[in-house]
Image: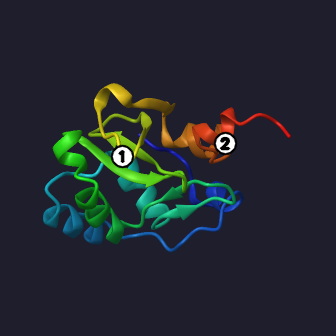
Amino acid sequence: MLTIARPRLAALYALNPGCDAQAIAAAEAELAFRLPADYAVLLRLSDGLHTQGRLALLELAAIGPRNADYEVQVYLPGYVMIGDDSGGRALLMRGDQSTVYEVGMGCMDENELTVSAQSLEQLLLAFGGRTLGERDAPCS
């Protein structure tokens, strides 16, 4: 379970006001899927998050439309798109697992998933919010 405190995140990122539990429950009631538990915790800390780099984590209101637009539940049942790398790669989580995956938005196939981080905590703290493309980019 995600254990980052809001002050620790706020020291690294500009945060939005968080969602309350009722808003998250209401959104889940409208969605055809449940949010990954760790992502729901993050939404309570900040409703979406954008880094200085390419990482964009979705606001609660954007999760349903984004997952519908890319038919995530059709091609990757059990996964939820939680954001993207601002370059054509989606970030996804599966159910109650903490792992964060990346996949090309035009190739929603389980065989194409790549582990981005073992958890949101690792992605945001240990990797500084950098996606795979940012971490793998050669130094200039």
Measured in 3D between alpha carbons, the distance from the residue under mark 1 to the one under mark 2, in whole angstroms, is 20 Å
Q: Is residue 18 above or below residue 76?
A: below
Q: Residue furthest front?
A: 106
- Residue at image position (23%, 39%) is 76
Callout 1 touching callout 2 (CB < 8 Å): no
Q: Quick one: quadrant of the N terminus?
A: top left
Q: Which residue is mark 2?
A: 134
Percent x, y of residue 128: 68, 45
Q: Is residue 124 left or right of residue 32?
A: right
Q: Secondary structure at mark 2?
A: helix
Q: Is residue 72 left or right of residue 115?
A: left
Q: Residue furthest top?
A: 111
Percent x, y of residue 118: 49, 30
Percent x, y of residue 123: 57, 41
Q: Which residue is mark 1?
A: 106
* In this rendering, the label closer to the viewer, 1 or 2: 1
Residue type at tag 1: Gly
Label disc, if present, on residue 48 of the rendered structure:
none
- Residue at image position (26%, 61%) is 69
Density class for disc 1 (Cα within 10 Å; few <14, some 14-19, many ≥20) is few
Density class for disc 2 (Cα within 10 Å; few <14, some 14-19, many ≥20) is some
Within the image, what quadrant is residue 140 found in?
top right
Within the image, what quadrant is residue 108 found in?
top left
Q: Secondary structure at mark 1?
A: loop
In the depicted view, which residue is nearer to us: 78 or 47?
Answer: 78
Q: Is residue 63 left or right of residue 54?
A: left
Residue type at tag 2: Glu
Q: Residue furthest right?
A: 140
- Residue at image position (82%, 36%) is 139
- Mark 1 or mark 2: name the one nearer the start of the chain: 1
Percent x, y of residue 89: 47, 46
